Image: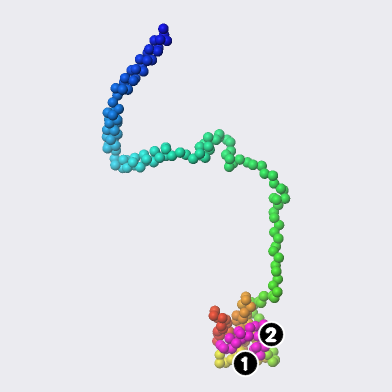
């Protein structure tokens, strides 16, 4: 008896809910909700309205966009267990590989001819020396000698060299004549290479 009465009561409740559900006017309910929201919206200051217009779409997008799987896996990992990047792996190392490497100095190849020095070289004129002989003896270019004679001037300090006179010269790193200095009793005359390859005279 009790079971039959419970079934009847349950059937009666369902019928009551269905009748009330069908009696509800959803269109009118929706319109009232829209009216209420509109009234609330109009009561807000304009600054708040603008902020809500920006924030609401952003929040909806954040809710709808799925999170990357990697972050979900990291959040689901139990606390206290190391992540994949933090796991320790035992490596078999050769003890000899831990020693400092020996640095082998590169072999220096000596040039066939020693490079010329860029320091000053002194030469004292001997009996029978001419300027061309001095240039040949000291392995200097005769083309440079010709260029020097072109700019030596009217006093001709190069053409009138005398025994016992001191000549000093300096070479570039390429072995070319850079500076030539002729020492005289009262003065020192200097010839120097110009950027165009020629020579100039100081005095």
Please state which of residues 164 and 148 is positioned toward the viewer in this rendering.
Answer: 148
Residue 118 colored in magenta in the image: no
Q: Secondary structure at mark 1?
A: loop
Where is residue 48 drawn, in percent x and y? 32, 40
Can residue 165 be seen here? The reply is no
Q: Nearer the viewer, residue 198 or 179?
A: 198
Residue on which disc 1 sits = 160
At a point 68% along the width and 90% down the height, the residue shown is: 129
> Of the residues under marks 2 and 1, which one precedes in the sequence?
2
- Is residue 12 positioned above or below 171 on the image? above
Q: Which quadrant of the figure contains the N terminus?
A: top left
Q: Residue 137 bears which disc, if any?
A: 2
The quarter of the picture where residue 133 lies is bottom right
Q: Quadrant of residue 120?
A: bottom right
Report the side of 153 relative to 41 (left or right).
Answer: right
Q: Residues within 10 Å of mark 2 (few under 14, many from 20)?
A: few
Residue 90, relative to residue 189: is it above or below?
A: above
Q: Main secondary structure of the magenta part?
A: helix
Q: Quadrant location of the C terminus?
A: bottom right
Q: Is residue 178 above or below residue 13?
A: below
Residue 98: image location, x then y, percent = 69, 50
Residue stretch rendered in magenta on the structure: 130-152
Q: How many angstroms separate mark 2 from mark 1 (CA)?
A: 18 Å
């Amino acid at each position: 008896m009790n079971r039959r009465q419970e079934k009847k009561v349950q059937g009666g409740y369902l019928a009551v809910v269905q009748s009330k559900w069908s009696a509800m006017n959803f269109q009118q309910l929706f319109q009232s909700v829209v009216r209420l929201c509109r009234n609330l919206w109009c009561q807000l200051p304009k600054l708040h309205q603008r902020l809500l217009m920006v924030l609401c779409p952003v929040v909806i997008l954040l809710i709808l966009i799925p999170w990357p799987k990697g972050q979900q896996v990291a959040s689901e990992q139990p606390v206290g267990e190391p992540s994949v990047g933090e796991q320790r792996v035992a490596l078999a190392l050769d003890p000899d590989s831990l020693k400092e490497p020996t640095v082998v100095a590169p072999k220096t190849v000596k040039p066939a001819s020693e490079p010329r020095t860029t320091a000053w070289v002194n030469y004292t004129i001997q009996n029978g020396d001419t300027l061309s002989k001095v240039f040949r003896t000291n392995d200097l270019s005769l083309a440079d000698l010709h260029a020097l004679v072109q700019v030596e001037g009217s006093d001709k300090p190069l053409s009138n060299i005398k025994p016992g006179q001191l000549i000093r010269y300096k070479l570039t790193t390429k072995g070319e004549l850079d500076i030539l200095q002729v020492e005289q009793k009262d003065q020192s005359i200097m010839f120097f290479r110009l950027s165009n390859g020629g020579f100039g005279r100081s005095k």
